[in-house]
Image: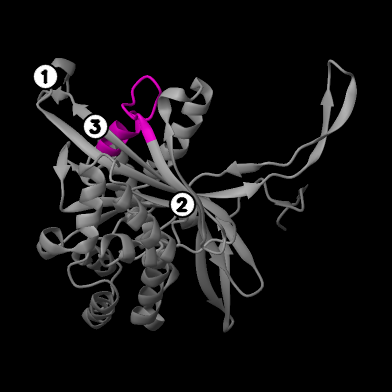
């Protein structure tokens, strides 16, 4: 799925746009015990309550693609005979009316979820009458030729609010505010099936994780029966590790600056192009960057071998997961230096008198602990 398709579905989760009529779910203790299983009618909710519930569900479609939103692919065998795919399809096809299937799903999900607080598993079904779009992107609401039927799952921690002191103006008096159990934004969730090319793709799904460093592999494996993709945080750490280890003594500041600059430029150009497809890079593109730094074929080959072992020879990675375009950090055991990304070239390394130094060009405006200083 691409950003436009995700955004199109997100816009469904407003009281005036949604076709949701009910939500089914269960309330689970921190020990994994089902405290209650329920079905909530949207028609009986107050508008404010409905908006808040839709906002919670919509959170499972938020964040960056490849970082918080992960594409899940089902092999043909799983679609044809897989128990996990069959259960998800039953939930979708029954519009959550199959209580036995819902109960079975809740049990599977609970077995794969670990939280230190009570939590809610929410399931919603929607039937989206997809409007036709012309070649110019124009929308024709009366030209729909398909209905996208899907389920959305949000798994939300439920935490006890803190008590406090409140002031009641009408009474002109202070009172203790009551504690209450509050539904928090989801930690994980998913969309099934995928909405690819604005059409139903039963061979795909979209998993959500609030924490990009943890994609909840047990949950993905249990719910989808699919191999979980590498988490964005793990991708970054792995890439940094193989870059340093494979280049060894040739992994200079110049090389890291070049990689950061090239990836940052790619991300910016992709953003400006408004390309609807996610930006990905492959091993050959990283190799090109390394070769422009003057690295030997031996070092580049060592990187290739490490890349294949860690990601796979034909892996496509999002550069957004590999570099932080908002900062450029230089760390030593004793000093941390943060440089504006577009000023990374102000930093260089030198060996003076046999001693290694990090040099930062500074013409004016130098401050130490807020005090302006002159460089003598």
Give the image location of residue 95, x and y in percent: 26, 39
Give the mark toward the camera: 3 or 1.
3
Mark 2 crowd level (few <14, some 14–19, many ≥20, 10 Å Cα)? many
Q: Please report whichever mark, 3 or 1, sits nearer to the chain's N-terminal start.
A: 3
Whether 365 is drawn above or below 55: the answer is: below
Work out whether residue 235 can be spotted.
Answer: no
Q: Residue at x 38, y 72 (%)?
A: 238
Which quarter shows the C terminus?
bottom right
Q: Which mark is residue 127?
A: 3
Q: Residue at x 44, y 57 (%)?
A: 212
Work out whether residue 330 can be spotted.
Answer: yes
Mark 3 crowd level (few <14, some 14–19, many ≥20, 10 Å Cα)? some
Which type of secondary structure does the marked residue at label 1 adopt?
helix
The part of the image, by quadrant, that contains residue 225 is bottom left
Q: Please report whichever mark, 2 or 1, sits nearer to the chain's N-terminal start.
A: 1
Q: Which of 329 and 376 is in front in this view?
A: 329
Give the image location of residue 33, x and y in percent: 52, 61
Give the image location of residue 45, x and y in percent: 48, 25
Give the mark toward the camera: 3 or 2.
3
Q: Residue 143 carries which label?
A: 1
Contact between marks 3 and 2 (CB within 8 A): the answer is no
Q: Which mark is residue 335?
A: none
Give the image location of residue 311, x and y in percent: 27, 71
- Give the extent of the magenta segment: 4-22
Q: Mark 2 points at which residue?
A: 210
Whether 68 is drawn above or below 236: the answer is: above
């Amino acid at each position: 799925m691409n950003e436009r398709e995700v955004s199109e579905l997100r816009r469904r989760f407003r009281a005036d746009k949604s076709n949701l009529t009910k939500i089914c779910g269960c309330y689970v203790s921190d020990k994994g015990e089902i405290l209650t299983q329920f079905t909530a009618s949207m028609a009986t909710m107050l508008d404010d309550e409905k908006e808040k519930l839709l906002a919670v569900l919509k959170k499972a479609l938020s964040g960056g693609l490849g970082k918080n939103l992960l594409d899940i692919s089902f092999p043909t065998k799983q679609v044809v005979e897989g128990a996990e795919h069959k259960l998800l399809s039953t939930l979708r096809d029954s519009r959550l009316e199959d209580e036995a299937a819902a109960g079975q799903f809740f049990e599977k999900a609970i077995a794969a979820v670990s939280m230190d607080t009570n939590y809610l598993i929410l399931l919603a079904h929607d039937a989206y009458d997809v409007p036709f779009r012309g070649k110019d992107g124009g929308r024709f609401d009366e030209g729909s030729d398909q209905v996208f039927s899907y389920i959305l799952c949000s798994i939300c921690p439920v935490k006890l609010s803190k008590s406090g002191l409140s002031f009641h103006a009408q009474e002109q008096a202070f009172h203790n505010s009551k504690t209450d159990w509050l539904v928090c934004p989801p930690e994980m969730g998913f969309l099934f099936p995928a909405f690819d090319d604005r059409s139903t793709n039963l061979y795909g799904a979209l998993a959500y994780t609030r924490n990009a460093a943890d994609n909840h592999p047990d949950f993905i494996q249990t719910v989808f029966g699919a191999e979980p993709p590498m988490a964005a945080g793990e991708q970054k750490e792995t890439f940094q590790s193989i870059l340093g280890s494979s280049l060894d003594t040739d992994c200079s500041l110049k090389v890291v600056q070049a990689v950061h600059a090239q990836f940052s430029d790619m991300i910016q150009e992709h953003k400006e192009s408004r390309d609807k497809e996610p930006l990905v890079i492959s091993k050959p593109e990283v190799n090109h960057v390394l070769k422009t730094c003057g690295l030997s074929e031996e070092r580049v080959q060592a990187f290739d071998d490490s890349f294949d072992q860690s990601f796979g020879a034909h892996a496509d990675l999002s550069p957004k997961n590999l570099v932080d375009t908002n900062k450029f950090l230089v760390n030593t055991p004793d000093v941390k230096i943060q440089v504006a990304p577009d000023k990374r070239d102000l930093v260089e390394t030198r060996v003076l008198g046999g001693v290694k130094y990090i040099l930062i060009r500074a013409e004016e405006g130098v401050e130490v602990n807020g005090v302006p200083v002159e460089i003598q």
